[in-house]
Image (spheres, grey):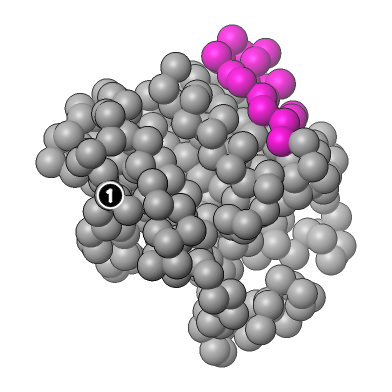
Amino acid sequence: MDIRTLPFDEALRFLRENGEPADLRDDIDTVSLRRRFPHLGGVEITELTIVTPTGVQPARLYRDSEAEPCGRALVWVHGGAFIGGYLDMPESNWVAMEFASQGVPVLAVDYTKCLGEVHFPVPSDDVLAAWEHAVAHAPELFGTSAEDLLLGGASAGASLTAGAVARLRDAGGTLPAGLISVYPAVHPNGAEPGVLPDPAAPHTQIALNYAGTVERLADPHVFAGMGTGDGFPPTLVVVCELDGLRPSGEAFARLLGDAGVDVVLHLEPGADHAHINEPADPTARPTIEAITAWMRR
């Protein structure tokens, strides 16, 4: 079953009652990816767990000892509308393998999904815990210093990581050396970033389910685009030509630029939302290459 085809309330109910459905694609497992992309053959994958305020979350460390070190490492967070997604999905597993093969060690992390009574700050707390774990253990995890760590994510993961940066900034925590935000929804109304959405509108369900209350829709710790860009680290924002959430990413890049942040906005021609969750999509690899080039600059 492809839950992306279901109305949001039905997808939420299905995931709550049944868990993540099996992905019917037969070419996205690690063995198949290595067969299709031989340069991934040297990537070593280690299963980890990270203690968070609500329990333990799975994580994976990706390293390639044969790749030329980039000098940077990355904590990466997948998407899934805050209700789905997992470490085996290509947006997590394939993407992390690709970066690791280019000399960027990756810690891919999971988080609690908003399936019922769970809302902000629970998933955000999980991401913060993973970031703080990476900072505390950078040398042994990545072979780099904490000062060389980047933070990034895609879709809901981009929202969580941008919100985590806002929380770290405001709390005086350790900020990442850079932020990678791929097709982000950093506003509760991604199609019209300057307008708070109607709580009763169907397209608001994802944002409200994550935020938990109408008041939190305007909270920049929940949706970073609702705040100021002051104090953000250098940032890469990737938007897709065909993505209905493209305005959110573009507005976020403007917000950061107006605050004097070193920000790069990359538009992927012909791409749609979640394209890096499809390794066969011809627009996916150009995005991976653009992110790698930004990390190496």
Position of the N terminus by quadrant:
bottom right
Asked whether, in this view, residue 240 is left or right of residue 228, the answer is right
The residue at 29%/68% (across/down) is: 55
Q: Position of residue 166 (x, y in %)?
A: 49, 33
Looking at the rendering, the stretch of residues picked out in magenta corresponds to 250-268
Q: Which residue is mark 1?
A: 42
Q: Residue at x 58, y 43 (%)?
A: 285
Please tell me in which quadrant of the rendered image residue 247 appears. Answer: top right
Q: Is 244 left or right of 122, judged from the image as shown?
A: right
Instruction: Give the residue furthest to the top.
Output: 260
Q: How many marks?
A: 1
| Whether residue 61 is visible | no
Residue 142 placement, left or right of 157: left
Question: Which residue is drawn at the image coordinates 23% and 59% (left, top)?
Answer: 46
The image quarter in which residue 17 lies: bottom right
- Quadrant of res 140: top left
In the displayed structure image, the side of residue 291 where residue 112 appears, left or right: left
